[in-house]
Image (cartoon, grey):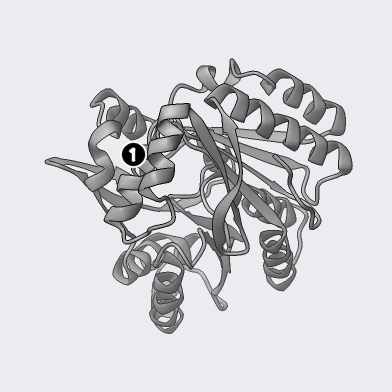
Amino acid sequence: MGVAIDAACDVPQDFLERNDIAVMPIAVKVDDERFKDDRDPAEIQRFRDRKLGSRSHSAETEASSVEDVQSLFLDRLVKEYDCVVCLTIMATRSPIHDNVIKASFAILKNYRPVREAVGRSGPFLMRVVDTRNIFAGAGPAIAETVRMIQAGKSPAEVRERAAQVADCSYGYMLPRDLNYLRSRARSKGDRSVSFLSSMLGTALDIKPILRAHRGETGPVGKIRGFEQGALALFEYAAKRVQAGLMVPSLSLSYGGDLDEMRDLPGYSRLVRTCEDAGVQILESPMGITGMVNVGEGAMTLGLASEDHVAEF
């Protein structure tokens, strides 16, 4: 069994390599610069080195098309695996989930001669899971999918568990630049960040804490100052870890150098809390798609937990 993810799912490169996870890329165009967001660290660094984050609110992004997904599977994955679990960011925010579903019909229709040509017999299966989250919020479902596969679970069991974790996943985002976030949102027809709130937030250094959960996104708190916002998020996450997570994994992504994130207040305590509880922290640079949509310097955090009310 193998795993494929959408490039907007923020997980570390070494985790992808260690578990041989395929990435369905996103094409990004900023002015005359073109990037392929496939979570390649060198490409992420090239984006940052070109200092495109501050002017990429007008960027064009294009998720893997139906044809792209078909090619990835028929050219590679059906030859290597008998079943592949595909995890995508929330279907309410991206067409990639629908594209994978549409592509699956052609893949399942045409895989047999491809597999026979490389000496593979038997059927090929696809299982598609909407993580109902975004960026680091998709991390828990991906980590649990890998764990279930390594435990030898069946495709049906893996998909059922991944969907259950997706329903219980909470993704949080702390942006640095509200004006950037508003401009990017407006360019995509999203009016959720109003002009007044972005202007007041910038003037008073008020940062919203945004939450993604079960396919919906919205603000759940506001904090003065990015560092205080990070402290509030880390303290919240530490409390959830102590209360017990559904998956022993917590995801963090940051739109910049990870050492900057590690210097934020509350980070060290969260790390110690996770170590004491046996919870793995998956830290990764935010992908190009994330930085384009929410701005450089933003932080996202993902965990899976029983239903609860977060207070910030």
Q: What residue do we see at 52% from left, 39% from top? A: 17
Image location of residue 299, percent across then percent down: 52, 34
Along the horizontal axis of the image, is 150 left or right of 171? Answer: right
Tell me which amino acid carries mark 1: Tyr
Looking at the rendering, which quadrant does residue 250 occupy? top right
Residue at 59% over, 32% down: 223
Residue at point 33%, 42% (across, down):
292
Residue that extends furthest to the left in the rendered view of this protein: 32
Q: Is residue 216 above or below residue 289?
A: below
Residue 290 in view in this figure: no
In what quadrant of the picture does the C terminus appear? top right
Picture layout, residue 145 above or below residue 270: below
Q: Which residue was labeled with disc 1?
A: 180
Q: Where on the picture, by quarter, is residue 41?
A: top left
Query: Residue 43 placed where, x, y %?
Result: 32, 34
Percent across and percent down for residue 44 are: 35, 33
| Image x and y of residue 138, in percent | 58, 52
Q: Quadrant of the N terminus?
A: bottom right
Depth check: give the residue in front, 145 or 309. 309
| 176 sits left or right of 226 in the view | left
Q: Nearer the viewer, residue 59 or 103?
A: 59
Residue 230 lies left or right of residue 149; in this view the side is left
Tell me the element at label 1.
helix
Q: Quadrant of residue 51?
A: top left
Closer to us: 182 or 60: 182
